[in-house]
Amino acid sequence: MTRRIRREPYDDDDGRTIVNMNVEGMPGYRRSRDEMRSPSNSEQTRPQQMLSKRETRMILFASMKWAFLFSAGFSLILILFILFCVKVWFA
């Protein structure tokens, strides 16, 4: 017989659920819990915030900068590999 340890509740726990872990197909799944949750959830009814044109442009330029950086890195590696093959390996 195992002994269950009673844990003290956390001081900063307010009882809210961050992520619903009641997923169909997992052990311990209860359909009644899914039916209790109403479809008009507070996260779903929250209005979406739109980005301004300046913020959208900043995100676009940042993503392009990183894409160019990665492509330049891969290009440099490819050029160095080809130089290695021509000058050292096939010589």
Image (tube, grey):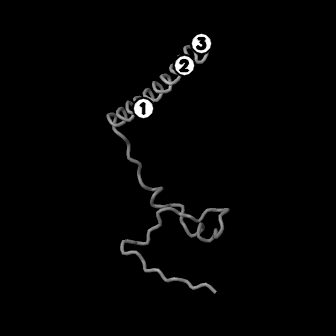
**Amino acid type for the residue under numbered disc 1:** Trp
* SS at circle 1: helix
Q: Which mark is residue 49?
A: none
Q: Is residue 32 above or below residue 79?
A: below
**Amino acid type for the residue under numbered disc 2:** Phe
Q: Which mark is residue 91?
A: 3
Of marks 1 and 3, which one's residue comes earlier in the chain? 1
Of marks 2 and 3, which one's residue comes earlier in the chain? 2
**Amino acid type for the residue under numbered disc 3:** Ala
Residue highlighted by disc 2: 84
Q: Nearer the viewer, residue 7 or 2?
A: 2
Residue highlighted by disc 1: 66
- Residue 82 position, x and y percent, is 55, 18
Task: Identify the residue at horizontal 60%, vertical 68% (top origin).
Answer: 35
Q: Nearer the viewer, residue 21 or 72?
A: 72
Image quadrant where one finds the C terminus:
top right
Give the alpha-carbon distance from disc 2 to disc 3, as whole Å: 10 Å
* SS at circle 2: helix
